[in-house]
Image (cartoon, rainbow, N blue to C red):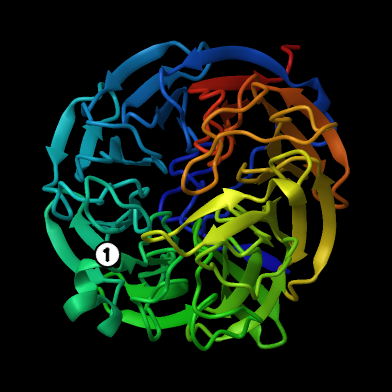
Amino acid sequence: MITLACSAIVVGQNWTMVNYDNSMSRNSPQTEIGKNNVDQLAVKWILNTGAAIENSPLIIGKTGYVQNNKYQVIAFNIDTGLNEWKYDPNVTFPSPSHGITYDKGVIYAPTGPNGTVVALDADNGKKIWESSALLPLGGSFVLTSPPLLWKNYLILGASFGDVVLQGAPATKGKVTALDKRTGEIVWQINTTVGNWVEGKNASTNGGATAWSGGSIDNDKGIVYLPCGNPAPDFNASSRPGENLYSNNVIAVNISTGKVLWATPFVAENTVLNATIPDTHDWDTCWGTNLVTINSSKGLEKIIIGHNKRGDVMAMNSATGKPIWWENVAYLYRTNVPAMPNGSGAVWPSPSGGVHSYSAFDENNVYVAVTNQGMNYFSEPGEGHVEPAFESMKNGIGNGSITALDLKTGKVKWEHKTDFPTWVSPLVTNGVVFSGTITAVGNNETGVTYPYGDYGGPSETPLITSGILRAYDTENGKELWEFNVGAPISIGGPSIGNGMLLVPTGNNMEASNPGGYIVAFGLPKE
């Protein structure tokens, strides 16, 4: 028997935070939509927010809330899709928002380039308070992480730990606790620790940012956070040693800010068969799952984390000791580091592996996998990547939706997809929802396109769309699909009160920015 650890908020039909609850289960107990009627879902309405969305909408009774990449918070009627209010923090540039949180009539939201957190009245959008900037502005720091909630604490991580913005080096990771009543900073801790970010290295190195949030043990007051890659991403010459806590999952006491344990993935002392140091930007990222399993030792809490190399690992929640680990991606030449003249094709890419949140039910953890090939360059400067077009005829790669046994990590089933996923799974009532993008070009002759420093398309021959897909949790059989007209948000859909809300917008695909919510429901009887 597997039980789901309970959220601090009684959620039920509501979806009060980006991953449903503090366990990050992405598992709703709703019973209206299931495998016997999922093929009857129909579009009820569409709301265009004006900018890409990369997080799951919240559902509170008959009101929905979402934040787009302009960091506008938008409230809407669940039945009609009509906008009820909008809060605009007037940011200087858009960037990926990973979501907002609701609690007792208040919406808590990051403000991206403004670097602050705001508390908004959920009824009318009026600002209750705004924190100070969590880190100095004017450099690479952008606050994109979803606010995590425990008692009177809000927990947020820094973001943009692998890019140079405004001439500044990558952000050095910090985790901040705020008082949810006032927005005052309670404590801050560094997630970049050691000689690699001190002295002469301080002006060059950064990263290890907890940008995607993590699960919380409500009983113990511990948050389990994945910390991203070290930077410079593709050139390790300036960062010898362990590069703590990059590519680790860390456990933090929320009351004190003390780091209780750290478990490495693609980092020193890992149990994984991985080449160290990381020069491929294979973050440990996209949250963690807190699961209570009934093992031979009795009820046992485990933490499940994953990374962009496709590694999925279960850890003891008290010690961080690995229990099982499995790789679900296509690995090719992963032992070849970034090199001055290029590595040649290496799979996966910095946007590959498990590059989205995961979901779990009483039996399995569900992950969306993306397989891509990239050519990794360590020079000039901090390096870059280029798509290995010769190794992927369709120009963009492929993927899968995969279910792993919670107790053993063994793959229960794998549904392969012709194109990348980039959609966080949602599990409910025997159904797993996820999705894929569509073709970026005609792959009969091979596909190429212009791209940025991280290999993502800046323009593609074809306009991409997003296919929403539903699978049977027992065997992975596809039950239903629907073309929503734009790439689906990497944050994935949410569900509650009879509605499935599918956000669109994905910074992996520049040809079709999306920015709207497609609402699905069953026909009225």
Look at 25% across and 51% down and name the residue there.
141
**Vertical position of residue 143 compared to residue 521: above or below:** below
Decide if residue 482 is on the left or right side of residue 8.
right
> Which x, y percent locates residue 78?
50, 19
Look at 25% across and 73% down and name the residue there.
257
**Vertical position of residue 183 compared to residue 321: above or below:** above
Per the image, label 1 sits on a secondary structure element best described as loop
Mark 1, residue position: 172
> Which x, y percent locates residue 378?
47, 65
Look at 84% across and 62% down and name the residue there.
412
Looking at the rendering, which quadrant does residue 479 occupy?
Answer: top right
Circle count: 1
**Vertical position of residue 376 compared to residue 246: above or below:** above
Badge 1 amino acid: Lys
Would residue 51 be seen by someone viewing this image from the given angle? yes
> Which x, y percent locates residue 504?
55, 27
Looking at the rendering, which quadrant does residue 289 occupy?
Answer: bottom right
Query: In the rendered view of the protein, which quadrant contains the N terminus?
Result: bottom right
Decide if residue 331 is on the left or right side of residue 50.
right
Question: Which residue occupies the foreground of this view, 278 or 151?
Answer: 278
Query: In the rendered view of the protein, which quadrant contains the C terminus?
Result: top right
> Which x, y percent locates residue 451?
53, 39
